[in-house]
Amino acid sequence: MTQTIAPRVRTLVLLLLAATGLLFAGAGPVSAHAAVTGSAPQQGAVVDKAPTQVSLTFSEKVALSDDSLRVLDPKGKRVDRGDPANLTSTTYAVKLHGGLPDGTYTVTYQVVSEDSHPVAGAYTFSIGAPSQTTVSVSGQSAGGGVVGTLYGFGRYVSYAGFIVMVGGAAFVLACWQRGAGVRALQRLTVAGWLALTAATLGLLLLRGSYTGSGKVGDVFDLDLLGQVLQTKTGAALVSRLLLLAAAALFIAVLFGAYEKREDEEKRDLTFGLAVGGVVVSAGLAASWAMSEHASTGLQAGIAMPVDITHLLAVAGWLGGLAALLVALYRAPADTPVDASAVRRFSRLAFGSVLALVATGIYQSWRQLGSWTAFTDTRYGQLLLVKIGLVAVLVGIAWVSRRWTGRLAEAVVVKPREESDPVAVTDADADEKEPARAGASGSGSGSASAGKGAAALGRKGAAGSDKADGESERAVQLARQQAAIDTARRKERRDADPNRFGLRRSVLAEAGVAVVLLAVTTMLTSTEPGRTEEEAKAATSASAADASSAGALTLDMSFDTGGEDGKGVVRVDLDPARVGGNEMHVYVQRPNGRAFDIPEVKVAFTLESQDIGPLPVVPDHITTGHWSASGVQIPMAGEWKVSVTVRTSDIDQTTVSKNAQIG
C-alpha cells in the first residue's frame, strides 16, 4: 500500500508546483496600489504657455527619491530642475526650466506607494502644438524583470515558511504533543523557519533594486541597502529577522526540553510555550501588516489587527494541515497519529475558518468598496478565485472530518477479542506488537543462550568465543524481528480503509492549499479594487472634460451690507478641468449693469481631500471684469468656489458655491 501512495504524492506535488508556476507566470509585473488620479498639465493636453512645474496627484501617499519625477523634452533631454516637492498630502511636483520651446514633453514617474509596492508610468503633454519625440516610454514598468520575479517568489516563500512554521508548532502543542518527538514534524517546522529566514534576507537585499532600477547588479549595492533600512518596509523586514531569532529559541525548546519531559511536566510547560508562541507569531504577522495593505487606506487602526488575526488563522489551518499530512504519512509505526489528535486539529481548523471568514469579509469590503469591483477589477477577480478555493477546501475538510469520525469509531467501538485476530484494532495492535517483539526477541535469546551453553560444555575455552558470536547473532535476530514487527504494524495501519481515506482527503486539502497560497500572494501585490475604480473614474472624468470645450459658469448674489452693496458675481472657468484654466469674473448690479468695485478675490477648496483654499487674485480688465489665466486645478472633484467682493474700504463679503471640476 505504501509503495502505491508515494508515487501519487510525488505526482500531486509536481502538479501543484506546475499550477503554482502558471499562476506566477500569468501575474506579470506587480500591480501597484497607488494610482495617478490627476496631473497638471493633463495627459495629452496642449497648453499655450510653458508651465513652471509639473504636478502629479496619487490616490495615496507615496515615497519619492531625487529622480522620482522627470520631464524630458522632445529630444529626451531633462528639463526639470531641483528635487520633487510635496504640495499636498498626495500631490507632488517638480519645477521646470524657463523658456521651454514648443513641442511634446514626456513626464515619467517612479515612486513607492505607502503599502510598499513600486509605481511607475509616463505620459505626454505639449506646449504650443504636438511634435515628434524621441523618448520611448513603452518599457516603463515597476516590479518587473528578473528582480521582480525573484521578489515575488521570495514573498511566496516567506508566506509559506511562516504558515508551515507556525502551523507545525501549533499542531504539536494544541493537537498532538507526542509529535514533538517525531523527526518528520521537527524537520517540517525547522524547514519553515529556514524558508522564512532565507526569504526575508533575500527580500531585504532585493528591495532596493526592486523599487528602483530593477537591475540584478544592484542587489548587493550597500548604498541601496542603507536606503532600504530607512524605509518602513526595511524596518519591517529587520524586525522580522529579530523575531525569527526568538522563534528559533522557541523551536529549540519545543523539540528539545519539551519533548523530553514527562506528561505531568509537559502540562506546566505547554502553557508557557503557547503564550510565547502566540506572541512571537503575532509579531511576525505584524511585520506584514505594518508595511502592506493594512497599513494604509481606510481604518488602518482596525485593519492592522484584523490582518494579523487573518494571517494567524491561515497558519493555524493550512500550516496545521501540512503538519497533519506529514504525521499521517511519515510518523513512525510505533508512534502513529491517533484519532483524538485529528479531532483536536479539526476543532482548531474550524475555529481558524471562522476567523478567516470574519476577517476576510472585512478585508474584502475595505479593499473593494463596491459589488461591481468583484468582476470589473483584477483584485476582485482574484478574490473570487480565492473564495472558490476556500469553498473547495472546506468541502474536502468536511470529507476528512467524516473519515476522522469513522477512524474514531473503529478504535473505540470494536470489542477486543483475543481469539479473533481480525477484530484487533490499530490501537490494540500497537499495544500488542511490542510485547510480541519482546517475547520473540526473548525466545530467540534464550534458545541462542542454550545453544551457547551446550557448546561451552563440549568445547571448553574454545567454545567461549563461539558463545560470544552466538550472543551477537541473537541480538541481530532480535533487531530483525523487531523490524519485521514494525513493518507488520505499519502495513496493518496503512491497510486500514479509514486511515487510508483520511490520508487521501488530507493530501487533497494540502494540494488545494498550495494553489490558494499562490493566489493569496498575488492578491497582496495587486492593486485593490477600490483604488482601481477610483483611478478609472478620475481618468474617465478627466478624459470627458478634456474632450468637451464647455466652460463652467457660476452666478452668486452678494450683499456687503453697506450703501449700494448688493449685486451678482459671475465666475466663468474654461475648460473647467484638471490642469490650467482660464478664469473670468464679472460683477454686476441687480439691474444687470457692470459694477465698478475696488477688489475681487477667488479661492478654490476641495474639502474631501483637504486641499485648499487655493487663492487666485485676478487682474482688473475693465469695469466689472476681472481675469486670470493658468488657474491650476490639481485634481478632479467637487470644488468649493469662494468669491470675496469688496465694495468699499470697509464693506466686503464672501459668497461660495460647489461645482464639479475635472
Image (tube, grey):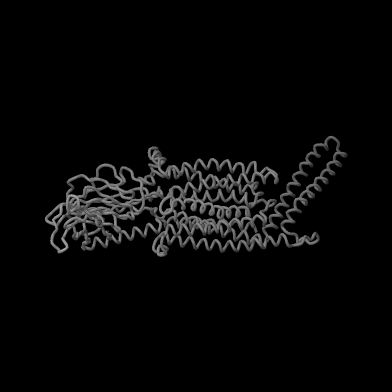
Q: Depth check: 50 or 500 in front? A: 50
**Residue nearer the viewer, 544 or 551:** 551
Q: Residue at x 58, y 40 (%)?
A: 249
Residue 117 location in percent, x, y? 39, 50
Residue 294 appears in the rendering: yes
Q: Residue furthest front?
A: 563
Residue 11 visible here: no
What is the total number of numbered labels drawn onto the structure image?
A: 0
Out of 518 and 66, give the one closest to the viewer: 66
Outermost residue toward the top? 461
Left or right, 348 with reference to 531: right
Q: Quadrant of residue 528?
A: bottom left
Q: Residue 72: image x %, image y %?
A: 24, 48
Q: Position of residue 504 (x, y in %)?
A: 60, 60
Instruction: Give how far across and how far down residue 448 sits, in percent.
Output: 81, 44
Left-right relation of 508 to 229: right
The quadrant of the picture occupied by the C terminus is bottom left
Please identify the quadrant where the N terminus is shown. Answer: bottom right
Q: Residue at x 74, y 62 (%)?
A: 414
Instruction: Left or right? Give the position of 443 relative to 146.
Output: right
Work out which residue is located at the far right of the displayed protein and give it.
Answer: 457
